[in-house]
């Protein structure tokens, strides 16, 4: 049991036995919060300002993140491509030396990922740094969840949910502290749910338009999970329309259907055009093409591996052949093991111990008719995710608004609990909020007490980039890996404009002559970097490439 969980347990016991402790002070804070919450538009304007300001205040302890994972580098390529005014780049003549994870080399040089996350990173890049895009997208996500909660709950409870989202997501977790994303899909899910609720009460063109925008964001960030998320909403909306009288339907259907359908039609056209620019086919998604070209393991658990694929460098062979055969076995036992691990990872990321506590009211929550849609969406998305052979919490990003709607409703049920005339439930909800808020100084304090760590590989890469940026001329860095290199620690990533880049990264491939690469970049200074030596050091490239007997 962690320290904060022990503190939570102690506070729960205190609330049970002394539920009126501090009641006057808590009631005052709750009254002020309720008065603020009723100013809904002001709250919507204030939320992004608070989210951005709070994270910026933590920069001395949590600076802007350094690129680390292959996905992040690929998203940055997407951002750089868009910032150059292109959807894809022409393939490079020396592409074999630039081959890297999650990046297509043919028929175009482009990221395999859907364009939404790359777009916000491109915005950040144009404003000065890609992480600015992450910061803005997280603030937009929290605002969208707030708007959604305002449509489903009384204003004070919507504000409570906003505080939970802000503390849980906008300050510390990896969505705000990396470039992988999550915020765009979460924003899309919140817009869909918030618009759906408002359309049932008062059909308006604006809300239908926002529903379409939310679905478009899901389609361009997490299309598979987004489709599973939107399907119950579409069915519920269709049932609601079907139950309307004909005379009412004539005035209800146009504002409900036309804006959303128009946005979705434009989305389909854009995605087809984007696909055609990247893969050459409007019906072939970049990620599907990348999987076809590189990944032996299928996306879904029931797909048999494609053992016919071969690779030109050992790192791809290690990750997609040797590694995949170790990690993604197809037996029921392995699927159950992966599913259990994924569920634990999801639950820890979204809720943790503190926000799990209100779900002691789950029996009441399951009988709550207003929550049925949320449970259906949760079930559909989770089942769909468990069919995938690997999992990261941002895969479930469309469910963010659903999760916090369930948390808020669980807190509402909890607040009604009484033992005799003692307001135990009120005290318990206050304990949950205190514990959530206490995590902010706790995490900041633990980070401040961390001793300086040895330089990680990605920090070393960032240092070398700064070093070469400050060195006159243009550079070609040859990256050499040992046979036991961990492939996810990948150094070879380039921007959209390889020819014009100050630094070009290339891999040394055992048994392959580097002379064509040297001839092509004859005007650049050539460096060697041994990737598995820490701290990383550059040296002039003088040694010939090693030969290997590996096939």
Image: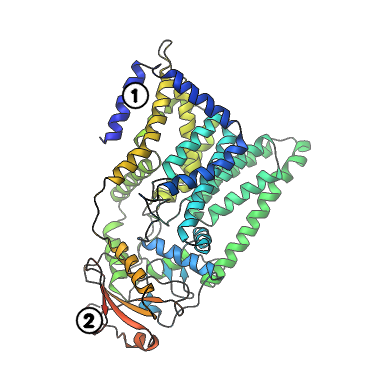
Q: Could you classify mark 1 by the number of other residues whose Cα lies within 10 Å: few (under 14), some (14-19), or many (20 or more)?
A: many
Q: Nearer the viewer, residue 334 or 412?
A: 412
Image side of residue 182 versus residue 247, left or right: left
Q: Residue at x 44, y 49 (%)?
A: 56
Vertical relation: 186 (above or below) 535: above
- Between tags 1 and 2, which lies in front? 1
Task: Write down the quadrant of residue 94 in the picture.
Answer: bottom left
Q: Nearer the viewer, residue 106 or 13?
A: 13
Q: Nearer the viewer, residue 458 or 356?
A: 458
Q: Position of residue 209 (x, y in %)?
A: 66, 48
Q: Is residue 179 above or below residue 106?
A: above
Question: Pointers 1 and 2 in contact (CB under 8 A)?
Answer: no
- The image's mark for residue 546 is 2
At horizontal 61% and vertical 51% (from top left) the residue drawn is 213
Mark 1 → mark 2, Cα distance in angstroms: 63 Å
Horizontally, residue 255 falls left or right of residue 456, namely: right
Q: How many marks?
A: 2
Residue extending farthest right:
247
Q: Is residue 112 left or right of residue 152?
A: left
Which quarter of the rendered picture does the C terminus lie within?
bottom left
Q: Is residue 155 above or below residue 305?
A: above
The residue to which callout 1 is attached is 12
* Upstream in sequence: badge 1 or badge 2: 1
Residue 486 lies, in percent from the top left, at 26, 64
């Amino acid at each position: 049991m962690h320290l904060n969980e022990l503190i939570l347990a102690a506070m729960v016991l205190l609330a049970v036995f002394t539920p009126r402790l501090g009641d006057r002070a808590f009631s005052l804070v709750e009254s002020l919060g309720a008065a603020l919450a009723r100013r809904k538009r002001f709250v919507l304007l204030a939320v992004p300002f608070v989210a951005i300001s709070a994270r910026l205040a933590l920069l001395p302890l949590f600076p802007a993140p350094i690129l680390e994972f292959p996905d992040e580098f690929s998203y940055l390529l997407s951002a750089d491509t868009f910032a150059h005014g292109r959807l894809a780049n022409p393939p490079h003549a020396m592409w074999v030396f630039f081959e890297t994870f999650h990046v297509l080399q043919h028929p175009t040089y482009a990221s395999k990922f859907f364009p939404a996350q790359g777009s916000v990173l491109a915005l950040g890049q144009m404003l000065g740094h890609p992480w600015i895009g992450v910061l803005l997208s997280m603030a937009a996500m929290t605002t969208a969840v707030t708007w959604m909660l305002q449509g489903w709950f009384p204003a004070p409870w919507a504000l409570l949910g906003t505080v939970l989202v802000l503390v849980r997501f906008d300050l510390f977790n990896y969505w705000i502290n990396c470039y992988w994303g999550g915020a765009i899909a979460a924003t899309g899910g919140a817009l869909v749910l918030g618009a759906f609720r408002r359309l049932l009460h008062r059909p308006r063109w604006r809300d239908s338009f926002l529903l379409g925008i939310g679905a478009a964001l899901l389609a361009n960030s997490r299309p598979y999970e987004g489709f599973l998320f939107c399907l119950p909403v579409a069915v519920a909306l269709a049932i609601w329309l079907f139950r309307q009288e004909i005379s009412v339907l004539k005035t209800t259907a146009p504002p409900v259907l036309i804006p959303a359908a128009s946005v979705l039609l434009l989305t389909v056209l854009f995605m087809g055009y984007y696909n055609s620019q990247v893969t050459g086919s409007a019906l072939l998604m970049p990620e599907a093409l990348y999987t076809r070209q590189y990944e032996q393991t299928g996306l879904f658990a029931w797909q048999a591996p494609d053992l016919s694929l071969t690779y030109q460098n050992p790192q791809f062979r290690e990750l997609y052949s040797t590694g995949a055969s170790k990690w993604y076995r197809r037996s029921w036992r392995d699927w159950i093991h992966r599913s259990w691990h994924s569920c634990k990872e999801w639950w820890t990321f979204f809720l943790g111990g503190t926000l799990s506590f209100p779900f002691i009211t789950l029996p009441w929550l399951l009988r709550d008719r207003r929550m049925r849609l949320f449970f259906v969406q949760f079930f559909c998305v989770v089942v769909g995710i468990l069919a995938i052979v690997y999992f990261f919490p941002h895969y479930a990003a469309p469910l963010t608004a659903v999760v916090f709607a369930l948390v808020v409703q669980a807190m509402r049920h909890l607040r009604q609990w009484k033992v005799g005339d003692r307001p135990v439930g009120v005290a318990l909800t206050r304990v949950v909020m205190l514990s959530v808020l206490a995590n902010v100084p706790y995490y900041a304090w633990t980070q401040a007490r961390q001793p300086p760590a040895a330089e990680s590989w990605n920090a070393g890469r960032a240092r070398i980039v700064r070093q070469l940026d400050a060195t006159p001329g243009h550079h070609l860095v040859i990256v050499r890996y040992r046979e036991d290199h961990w492939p996810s620690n990948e150094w070879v990533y380039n921007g959209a404009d390889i020819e014009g880049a100050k630094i070009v990264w290339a891999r040394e491939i055992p048994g392959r002559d580097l002379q064509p690469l040297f001839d092509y970049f004859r005007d650049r200074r050539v460096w060697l970097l041994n990737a598995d030596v820490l701290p990383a050091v550059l040296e002039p490239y003088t040694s010939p490439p090693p030969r290997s007997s590996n096939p």
